[in-house]
Image (cartoon, rainbow, N blue to C red):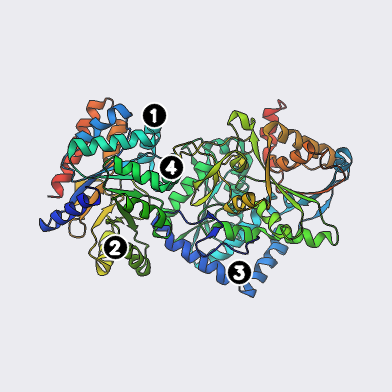
């Protein structure tokens, strides 16, 4: 359980020479009651990234911002978000990664947050505004609860920082494939290959690429470098735009299926 | 204890730090190194002082407010930052950061603005140094500070309306940070207050401390008993408080009380908030039990912010300064009071400091009180006319 589920996943994917698919979805979207059915409509996921909405998501583009606002407005609390994450894990049997922002964690305290995430059956935690320099107290609490900590490497991260990040032993590295915040891009990433090469030169820690990956082609382009690919905005947008929950589920299923297929 | 600079983790005590996306961390390191080098370099500092004197119009005057003093029974001194070029203290910081950008070799400035004064100051610095400039401003603030939007356009800056959240300073700051994540390779984010991830709170305080240093020099042997400044993010207050920490004066920061602290519609981050992480640093902020940021409210766009600079949180916890608040209504009355007694129309932001002195005049009787008049009120005339029914 916990971080081991993820470690097993990446070990298996590597032995199969496969890149894992880690879809992101905002918890509580479009409403807390309907949220689980949206997660259930995602096809081909190897693990789920469950976003606990935050009022001021600095690392997110317009789509995930809007999703967070909608989920909060519909009454999604930290507790409810984690209970949705728990259901996602139970019903799919896949590892669940909790993604949120630092203030959500500090407000309940890192220790209590880690315990809540562990109770929800989560495997790992991603904090979008938590660089290695500030990560220690949260990482210690998360790991003491048996979960893995995810740390970021960006195209701007230099070799010295990469070696510090690797030395902190994250359960995987979130490789920021694009300069900028989350959201769909038309062009392919020009940064992923270089970033992967620099991480690989320092460590064989699993590398999962995210930010700006929204099409099957963009996801497939990551296969040579990445142990996993995170796709968020492309899956969240149809939930915001679809007229009914059935339409949303159908669109999410279609997009996720194409991306999962592109990674096989 | 007064800290010359935050510790090596960017902290003032337990406040501050660097809670930023990884993409920005190298730029924050670069900025810290560039500032350390420049600020220790006599030729940079001399050039900065020269620009403040020749271009910004420093030293700004400081004088007794005779009729206001008589009316309140308190000796009131005014530090006239409203007379600095562009009409507020914000230019001290914008010129300093503009010089740093020259050193770092970036070609573009971005900034957030609430009242528009920092946007105007940044647009001015961009024009002066020949840099591209984009200013993020909430749509509600664009509406209530229209004059400053025109000024930024005239200065050649692009003003980008921010529609997320309540369309105020917090949201403009979010959007400017997001833009910085995208364009960090060639863009400098000119933060306008003593907020944000390290090293910004330190840099902005250093560029603003000229206010207090100048004030002390101008006073000669006289020492005020109380120094008062309005506090949104807190840059003008940091600039005047920091040098006065050594003088024994009582330091009072006046936060936006909005419609009243009891109503929940205010901007009193220290007075009614709790520690958390906002815009990259740990500090007092307005938040709910789940850590969601609560929207601030203030009639003044510059104080309509749910956080405060981390050094103010440090001062507050240690009693080095205290933080009070006045309501929208009290601030608007204070605009009127200063205009009619001294012939000075203050910014509604700065009027918060005046309003506190006016309200506390009995307790302050016989004392000498220095008010940092951080900005002029031209930008607010249209809004005041609308509120007061004179339009």
Check disc 4 and report the residue beneath it.
A108
Which type of secondary structure does the marked residue at label 2 adopt? helix
Residue at the image position 44 percent from the left and 37 percent from the top: B290
- Count of picture labels: 4
Other residues around mark 4 within 10 Å, as few (<14) / some (14–19) / many (≥20):
some
Nearer-the-camera pick, A168 or B68: A168
Check disc 1 and report the residue beneath it.
A75
Mark sitting on residue B39 = 3
The residues tagged by marks 1 and 4 sit, at their Cα atoms, a distance apart of 18 Å
Looking at marks 2 and 4 on the same chain, the residue that comes earlier in the sequence is marked by: 4
Residue at the image position 22 percent from the left and 39 percent from the top: A89
Check the image and name the residue furthest to the left: A16
Query: In the rendered image, which quarter is residue B325 located in?
Result: top right
The residues tagged by marks 3 and 2 sit, at their Cα atoms, a distance apart of 34 Å
Image location of residue A82, percent across then percent down: 32, 37
Q: Are marks 1 and 2 in contact (CB under 8 Å)?
A: no
Other residues around mark 3 within 10 Å, as few (<14) / some (14–19) / many (≥20):
some
The residues tagged by marks 1 and 2 sit, at their Cα atoms, a distance apart of 39 Å
Q: Is residue A110 left or right of residue A42?
A: right
Query: In the rendered image, which quarter is residue A52 located in?
Result: top left
Image mark 2: chain: A
Which type of secondary structure does the marked residue at label 3 adopt? helix
Q: Are marks 4 and 3 in contact (CB under 8 Å)?
A: no
Q: Is residue B343 left or right of residue A214?
A: right
Image mark 1: chain: A
């Amino acid at each position: 359980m916990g971080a081991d589920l993820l470690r097993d996943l990446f070990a298996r994917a590597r032995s199969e020479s496969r890149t894992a698919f880690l879809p992101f979805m905002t918890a509580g979207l479009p409403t807390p009651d309907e949220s689980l059915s949206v997660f259930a409509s995602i096809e081909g996921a190897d693990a789920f990234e469950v976003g606990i909405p935050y009022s001021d998501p600095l690392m997110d583009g317009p789509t995930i911002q809007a999703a967070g606002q909608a989920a909060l407005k519909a009454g999604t609390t930290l507790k409810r978000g984690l209970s949705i994450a728990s259901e996602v894990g139970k019903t799919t049997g896949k590892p669940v990664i909790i993604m949120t922002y630092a203030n959500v964690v500090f407000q309940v305290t890192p220790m209590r947050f880690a315990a809540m995430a562990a109770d929800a059956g989560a495997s790992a935690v991603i904090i979008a505004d938590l660089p290695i320099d500030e990560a220690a107290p949260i990482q210690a609490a998360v790991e003491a609860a048996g979960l893995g900590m995810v740390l970021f490497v960006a195209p701007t991260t230099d070799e010295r920082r990469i070696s510090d990040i690797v030395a902190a032993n994250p359960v995987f590295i979130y490789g920021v494939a694009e300069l900028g915040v989350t959201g769909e891009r038309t062009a392919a990433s020009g940064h992923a290959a270089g970033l992967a090469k620099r991480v690989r030169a320092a460590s064989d820690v699993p590398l999962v690429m995210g930010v700006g990956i929204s099409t099957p082609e963009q996801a497939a382009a990551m296969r040579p470098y990445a142990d996993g690919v995170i796709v968020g905005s492309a899956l969240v947008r149809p939930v915001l735009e679809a007229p009914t929950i059935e339409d949303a589920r159908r669109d999410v299923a279609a997009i996720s299926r194409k991306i999962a297929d592109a990674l096989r | 204890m007064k800290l010359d600079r935050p510790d090596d983790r960017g902290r003032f005590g337990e406040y501050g730090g660097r809670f930023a996306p990884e993409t920005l961390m190298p730029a924050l390191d670069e900025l810290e190194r560039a500032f350390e080098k420049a600020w220790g370099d006599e030729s940079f500092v001399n050039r900065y002082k020269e620009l403040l004197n020749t271009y910004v119009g420093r030293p700004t005057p400081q004088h007794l407010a005779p009729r206001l003093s008589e009316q309140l029974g308190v000796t009131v001194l005014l530090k006239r930052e409203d007379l600095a070029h562009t009409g507020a203290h914000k230019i001290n910081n914008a010129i300093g950061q503009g010089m740093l950008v020259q050193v770092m070799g970036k070609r573009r400035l971005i900034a957030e603005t609430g009242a528009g004064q920092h946007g105007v100051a940044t647009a001015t610095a961009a024009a002066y140094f020949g840099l591209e400039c984009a200013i993020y401003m909430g749509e509600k603030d664009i509406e209530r500070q229209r004059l400053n939007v025109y000024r930024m356009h005239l200065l050649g800056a692009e003003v980008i309306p921010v529609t997320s959240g309540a369309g105020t300073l917090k949201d403009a700051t979010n959007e400017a940070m997001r833009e910085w994540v995208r364009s960090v390779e060639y863009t400098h984010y000119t933060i306008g207050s003593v907020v944000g991830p390290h090293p910004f709170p330190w840099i902005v305080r250093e560029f603003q401390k000229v206010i207090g240093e100048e004030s002390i020099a101008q006073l000669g042997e006289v020492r005020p008993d109380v120094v008062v400044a309005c506090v949104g993010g807190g840059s003008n207050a940091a600039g005047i408080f920091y040098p006065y920490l050594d003088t024994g004066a009582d330091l009072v920061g006046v936060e936006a009380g909005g419609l009243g602290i009891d109503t929940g519609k205010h901007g009193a981050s220290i007075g009614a908030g709790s520690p958390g992480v906002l815009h990259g640093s740990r500090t007092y902020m307005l938040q709910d039990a789940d850590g969601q940021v609560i929207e601030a409210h203030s009639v003044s766009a510059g104080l309509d912010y749910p956080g405060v600079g981390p050094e103010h949180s440090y001062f507050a916890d240690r009693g080095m300064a205290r933080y009070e608040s006045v309501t929208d209504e009290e601030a608007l009355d204070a605009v009127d009071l200063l205009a009619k007694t001294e012939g000075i129309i203050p910014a509604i932001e700065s009027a918060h400091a005046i309003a506190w002195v006016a309200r506390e005049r009995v307790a302050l009787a016989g004392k000498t009180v220095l008010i940092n008049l951080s900005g002029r009120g031209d930008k607010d005339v249209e809004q005041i006319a609308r509120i007061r029914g004179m339009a």
